[in-house]
Image (cartoon, rainbow, N blue to C red):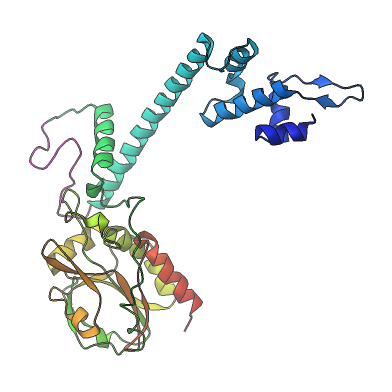
Amino acid sequence: MRIGELARRAGVTAKAVRYYEALGLLIPRRLANGYRDYGENDVRLAQEIRALRSLGIPAERTRPFLDCLEAGRRHADDCPASLAGYRDAIDELTERIEALTTRRAALISHLQEAAHRNSSVAPVHANHPPGQAGQADHPDPAHEARGLSEDLTEDPMNHYLSLPADLPVPEDDGAAGHLPGMKAPSTAFAGTAGETIRIDALGAGRTVIYVYPLTGRPGTDLPEGWDSIPGARGCTPESCGFRDHHQDLLAAGAAGVFGLSSQDTDYQREVVERLDLPFQMLSDPMLDLAETLRLPTFEISGMTLYRRLTLIIRDGVIEHAFYPVFPPNEHAEQVLTWLRDNPL
């Protein structure tokens, strides 16, 4: 058979077949006209190379497995040399995992240090739970790296800057469909800068107000079942997104940005300091905005909290509402795109 047919049947490319030949793994016979002629055995060998490469074993290290097949064994790993090849690949992978785990732990450590630099709340380390900090004056770095990584894997609720991959996606239940065109209410809220902000007196232009359930703190558990509520998880990543894109939002036409939740001002002030937010948070502990605008809420652990949404208020009128919001860590970019697509 020709190289194209071999490649198709083996599930590889013609370029890969030529590479296998260059390594001496495939040796086709030559026809009188000089063309390569491949047989069924070549198909089997090429398939085996592809299978081993999918396991992370490079083509140049598949020789022991192919020799096992050439020796008449039913399986490429029926020979001792093949088992040794597996062990070598496992050892190499283990070294890479350990190196990556150490690097990941170092990055997390830097992230936590930076996140708490301006905060009055001390970071909670994996190997030093609250009340036990400082018990080991000279901890083993490798042990700390493993411990931190394992802690964050086993208890993702404490890894407040991350979002689990399997978060439920909120559905549009129409709870915000009535908002565009409504006048902004005269409701006033305490801001984290010590001033009172009235929603109907934000000034000319567009103001972005992202409404969220609650922000968590490192080392503090979120309500039980938090991740199972569509749209609940992700308030801190969302706030970080608005922080990182703040200047872009202003350049795109936003006169200001605010976050709003039912948490008290002292709690929000700590968040602003810890995350180094360049804008104020507004506190609405009585859910006044929910009552005046009929905003969607949900209940958990005896609390009534806002469902995540964002309002664009222009000259005292709600111009646009983002609802539902997902994923929260990308929402600032979604708002930025809308502002750019709808210039004043």
| Rendering quarter of residue 279 | bottom left
> What percent of the width, then of the height, locates residue 29?
81, 19
> What percent of the width, then of the height, locates residue 173?
33, 73
Please state which of residues 267 and 291 is positioned toward the viewer in this rendering.
291
Camera sees residue 82: yes
Q: Is residue 129 magenta?
A: yes
* Residue positioned most to the front: 74
> What percent of the width, then of the height, locates residue 209?
30, 75
> What percent of the width, then of the height, locates residue 172?
36, 71
Task: Identify the residue shown where x is 48% and y is 14%.
Answer: 83
**In which quadrant of the rendered image does the N terminus lie?**
top right
Q: Is residue 115 magenta?
A: no
Camera sees residue 263: no
* Residue positioned most to the left: 131
Please state which of residues 133 and 44 is positioned toward the viewer in this rendering.
44
Q: Which region shows up in magenta?
A: 117-135
Please state which of residues 285 and 323 is positioned toward the viewer in this rendering.
323
| Rendering quarter of residue 34 | top right
Task: Identify the residue shown where x is 35% and y is 65%.
Answer: 242
Is residue 88 found left or right of 110 in the rendered image? right
Please state which of residues 338 and 271 is positioned toward the viewer in this rendering.
338
Task: Identify the residue shown where x is 43% and y is 68%.
Answer: 334
* Residue positioned most to the right: 33
Is residue 185 found left or right of 179 in the rendered image? left
Magenta span: predominant SS is loop
Is residue 81 found left or right of 14 in the rendered image? left
| Rendering quarter of residue 95 | top left
